[in-house]
Image (tube, coloured by chain):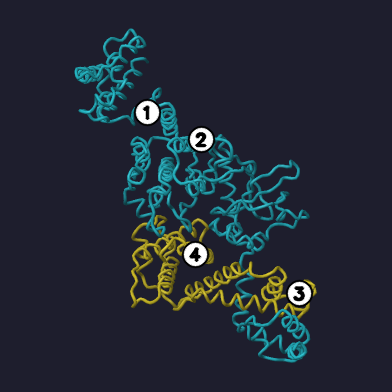
């Protein structure tokens, strides 16, 4: 049997070529076939023809020799599915002597790929001199082919490097190696907010507030430098391990707001789920565009998914510009109304309806967080306390408001709502005040449920919070 | 195309094609980006409106026709307005471009280039480095088989066999991407 096969492989046999191409040869037969090819030019020729016609061989040569050796994918998921591809895509790395490493780049020993961004690839590299890991973001070769793209990358990196803040990832250096621009950032162990949401679903109210507050602080620092991030989304928020700190990463799309020569696009292949309406319409953007994206991000933290979803980018953009988001409480009823209102305001279609600045948002979020942590001690910011009456009081002055509150509170007290708490607390009130603090205390200590059956809770809450605010204003 | 993955796949092929075409036509990077954005937005709008209809043929063929029209129209128009305004999108979808002009040839070439590139990327992991290099050195880089055999420390016959195995797989993969029918 074996002898017969050997003879077959040693003579020219067109069927054997077909069998080889159809993968029908055993390992032994295959070796023998290769041995035959070794000495038989005619069979080599035949094999080449039967594999593919000449046009395809020509196309392979033409198209593949001009293609980028390094293929950077848009989605990090594709990386995890096909890690073998790294060998093809990381050909720009120089060889290394260290078998544990992938290669060398700009003096760093590269040990892995952290991720892919819109414009480049992020590597994990060891700085042998400092024996310290760094994250190295390299501009994707197909972008690096032109001088203007390289300049843009460098300009963005320099702008981002100017933002020094606890909640913005630091940039240690910007340089170029073998015509590939790169920047050096600290390598930080942790996960992105996107991963966190994917793995654990919606976040607690306190977590939403904490992450949003720190993000807003980082944004405020960037905005101070005239820098709009343009791409705030959970994938760009890094949550380092073991510390309660939030880092904004990837100012890759951020551009100096006054640099009119730069492109305004940002949608190309990705999904623009966190984009602001003005970005979606291709209009000019400003600091408040980041606030919209922050609102979308808070929505995603609260519900587990972004506020605007569709199957294609265009569908998403239409929803962002033309449709209201689904109310959060329809998706997750336990999110407090004031937080929903906070997010709704960030998600205002018109930029002027959002908050004035990231700074203001950060301050408000801080107050909200304090309230959630100590509800009995700290009250919500005034604007999230219920509603018309509060604003009216503010406008018409403390005294009128106080008188009105007093009237309401008295009418409540007439219905036996003043409890013993009032008398206990009376000693704590500011002595120089007369009627108002007393009355406010009456309402600050809520009556028990049984006494409230005739009345709606939220109205009492209104009075309570309004009185709190009045108290504070009087104490000033 | 009923899910985001299919869209991502489509955008992943067409984005580099559009960017290269735009640069060949002399556009700046920023304008090339904008052009690509306009085309992809236009196509994604068409996809939103698409309903299965036997008379319009296979979805993939339809999608390619829409995309190719939009690209050719965009190249002709150039970057007039940077906004993805609705009238721009409509114009990209509705005008009937010249399907036999030089731009059309260029588009076919660049699309095919991208398909080869993606196909190569996708099949790379199915082969050992030696097998892959046998193919790449001789079929792509144009190195003589004898030389490649010495370089790789393999026999001439095994280089021939290896590169044919890769080529056969590449051919299959390339054929999976339906070719443009114009």
| Image depth: mark 3 or mark 4 in front | 4
Which lettered chain is shown in yellow? B
Closer to us: B163 or B136: B163
Where is mark 4, residue-wise?
Answer: B9
| Image mark 3: chain | B
Residue contact between numbered discs 2 and 3, judged by CB atoms under 8 Å: no
Label 2 sits on residue: A221
Residue B6, percent across and down? 46, 64
Q: Residue at image x 51%, y 35%?
A: A221
Task: Label 4, secondary structure: give it.
Answer: helix
- Label 1 close to label 4 by CB (< 8 Å): no
**Disc 2 element:** helix
First in sequence: mark 1 vs mark 2? 2
Q: Do the residues labelled 3 and 4 touch (CB within 8 Å)?
A: no
Residue depicted at x 78% and y 86%: A39
- Check the rendered structure and report the hue given to chain A: cyan
What residue does disc 3 label? B148
């Amino acid at each position: 049997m074996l002898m017969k096969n050997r003879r077959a492989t040693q003579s020219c046999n067109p069927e054997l070529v077909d069998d080889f191409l159809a993968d029908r040869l055993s390992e032994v037969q295959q070796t023998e076939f290769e041995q035959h090819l070794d000495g038989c030019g005619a069979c080599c020729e035949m094999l080449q023809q039967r594999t593919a016609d000449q046009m395809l061989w020509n196309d392979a040569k033409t198209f593949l020799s001009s293609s980028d050796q390094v293929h950077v994918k848009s989605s990090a998921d594709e990386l995890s599915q096909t890690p073998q591809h790294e060998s093809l895509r990381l050909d720009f790395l120089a060889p290394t002597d260290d078998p544990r490493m992938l290669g060398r780049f700009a003096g760093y020993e590269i040990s892995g790929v952290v991720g892919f961004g819109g414009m480049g690839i992020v590597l994990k590299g060891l700085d042998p001199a400092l024996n310290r890991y760094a994250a190295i973001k390299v501009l994707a070769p197909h972008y690096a082919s032109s001088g203007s793209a390289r300049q843009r990358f460098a300009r963005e990196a320099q702008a981002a490097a100017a933002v020094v803040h606890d909640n913005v990832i630091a940039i240690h250096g910007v340089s170029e190696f073998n015509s590939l621009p790169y920047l050096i950032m600290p390598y930080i162990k942790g996960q992105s907010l996107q991963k966190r949401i994917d793995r654990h679903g919606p976040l607690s109210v306190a977590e939403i507030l904490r992450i949003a507050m720190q993000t807003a602080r980082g944004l405020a620092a960037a905005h101070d430098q005239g820098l709009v991030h343009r791409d705030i989304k959970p994938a760009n928020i890094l949550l380092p391990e073991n510390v309660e700190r939030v880092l904004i990463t990837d100012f890759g799309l951020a551009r100096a707001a006054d640099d009119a020569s730069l492109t305004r696009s940002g949608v190309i292949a990705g999904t623009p789920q966190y984009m602001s309406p003005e970005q979606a319409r291709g209009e000019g953007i400003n600091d408040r565009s980041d606030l919209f994206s922050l609102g979308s991000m808070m929505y995603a933290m609260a519900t587990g998914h972004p506020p605007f979803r569709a199957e294609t980018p265009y569908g998403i953009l239409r929803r962002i510009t033309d449709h209201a988001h689904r109310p959060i409480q329809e998706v997750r009823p336990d999110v407090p109304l004031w937080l929903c209102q906070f997010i709704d305001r960030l998600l205002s279609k018109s930029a002027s309806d959002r908050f004035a600045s990231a700074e203001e948002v950060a301050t408000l979020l801080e107050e909200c967080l304090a309230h959630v942590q100590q509800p009995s001690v700290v009250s919500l910011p005034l604007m999230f306390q219920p509603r018309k009456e509060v604003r009216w009081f503010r406008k018409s002055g403390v005294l009128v408001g106080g008188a009105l509150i007093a009237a309401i509170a008295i009418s409540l007290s007439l219905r036996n709502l003043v409890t013993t708490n009032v008398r206990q607390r009376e000693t704590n009130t500011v002595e120089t005040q007369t009627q108002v603090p007393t009355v406010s205390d009456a309402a600050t200590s809520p009556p028990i449920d049984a006494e409230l059956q005739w009345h709606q809770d939220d109205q009492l809450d209104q009075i309570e919070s309004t009185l709190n605010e009045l108290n504070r204003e009087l104490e000033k | 195309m009923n899910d985001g993955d299919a869209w991502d796949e489509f955008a992943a092929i067409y984005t580099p094609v559009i960017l290269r075409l735009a640069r060949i036509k002399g556009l700046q990077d920023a304008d090339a980006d904008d052009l690509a954005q306009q085309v992809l937005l236009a196509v994604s709008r068409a996809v939103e409106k698409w309903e299965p209809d036997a008379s319009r043929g296979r979805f993939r063929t339809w999608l390619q026709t829409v995309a190719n029209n939009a690209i050719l129209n965009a190249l002709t128009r150039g970057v007039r307005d940077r906004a993805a305004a609705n009238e721009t999108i409509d114009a990209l979808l509705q005008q009937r471009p010249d399907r036999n002009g030089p731009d059309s040839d260029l588009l076919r070439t660049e699309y095919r280039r991208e398909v080869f590139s993606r196909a190569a990327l996708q099949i790379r992991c199915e082969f050992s480095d030696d097998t892959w290099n046998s193919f790449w050195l001789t079929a792509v880089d144009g190195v003589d088989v004898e030389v490649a055999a010495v370089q790789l420390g393999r026999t001439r016959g095994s280089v021939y066999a290896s590169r044919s195995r890769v080529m056969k797989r590449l051919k299959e993969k390339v054929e999976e991407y339906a070719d443009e029918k114009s």
